[in-house]
Image (spheres, grey):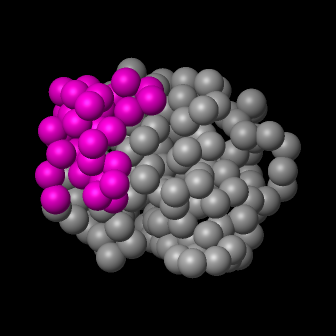
């Protein structure tokens, strides 16, 4: 993995994130030298993951969304899980946070159901993406071109389908942030 010393990355999530899709990128990016903040709406000190078929472990929240400044981060990671992005896409502040990264041309990486936030923020339109298969129709209806690949990079957008794709997802994030 690329050396990410001095880079700062935001992971936006709430309760119901897919455990591996937050924890594995978090660990890989930190191991590569990046400072990574877990950001979440509200004032909870932790958020609870979903581990495949049941509630999983909690992860500490580093920064409340209301206090997060997209300008102070080099990239944004959007883990999936069905509940997490569905709740976030209904939160206008979360959508604005995602859009700010896209507008600034910073890397935005979304996996599984995370691309729902690309739809809601308008970042999917005219872009090549992938996702969990059930999100395909939403992405196509939003004007994206969907493909079934472990990772799709289109400019500053990085998308992957599922937990099995995490190694390729992490490598693409690191390459984009280091580049």
- In the image, 31 versus 134, the foreground residue is 134
The N terminus - image quarter: bottom left
- In the image, 125 versus 102, the foreground residue is 125
> Is 140 in the magenta?
yes
Q: Residue at x 62, y 24 (%)?
A: 92
| Residue 152 appearing in the image | yes
> Is 126 in the magenta?
yes
- In the image, 65 versus 51, the foreground residue is 51
Image location of residue 128, percent across then percent down: 17, 40
Q: Which residues are magenta?
A: 119-148
Q: Residue at x 51, y 60 (%)?
A: 81
Residue 45 is drawn in which quadrant? bottom right
Q: Residue at x 29, y 58 (%)?
A: 133
Image location of residue 113, percent across then percent down: 43, 53
Q: Residue 167 vs residue 20: left or right?
A: left
Q: Residue 172 vs residue 21: left or right?
A: left
In the image, residue 9 above or below residue 70: below
In the image, residue 164 above or below residue 26: below
In the image, residue 146 above or below residue 24: above
| Residue 22 appearing in the image | no
In the image, residue 165 above or below residue 84: below
- In the image, 179 versus 125, the foreground residue is 125
Image location of residue 34, percent across then percent down: 50, 58
Q: Residue at x 60, y 40 (%)?
A: 88
Q: Residue 178 vs residue 56: left or right?
A: left
Image location of residue 168, percent across then percent down: 26, 68
């Amino acid at each position: 993995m690329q050396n990410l010393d001095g880079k700062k990355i935001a992971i936006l999530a709430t309760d119901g994130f897919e455990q591996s899709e937050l924890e594995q990128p978090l660990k890989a990016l930190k191991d590569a030298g990046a400072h990574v903040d877990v950001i979440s709406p509200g004032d909870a000190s932790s958020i609870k993951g979903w581990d495949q078929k049941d509630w999983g472990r909690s992860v500490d929240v580093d920064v409340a969304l209301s206090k997060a400044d997209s300008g102070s981060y080099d990239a944004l990671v959007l883990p999936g899980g069905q509940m997490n992005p569905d709740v976030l896409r209904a939160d206008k502040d979360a959508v604005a946070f995602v859009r700010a990264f896209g507008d600034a041309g910073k890397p935005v990486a979304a996996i599984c159901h995370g691309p729902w936030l690309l739809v809601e923020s308008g970042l999917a339109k005219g872009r090549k993406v992938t996702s969990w298969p059930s999100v395909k129709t939403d992405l196509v209806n939003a004007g994206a071109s969907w493909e079934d690949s472990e990772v799709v990079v289109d400019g500053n957008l990085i998308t992957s389908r599922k937990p099995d794709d995490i190694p390729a997802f992490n490598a693409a994030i690191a390459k984009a942030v280091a580049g």
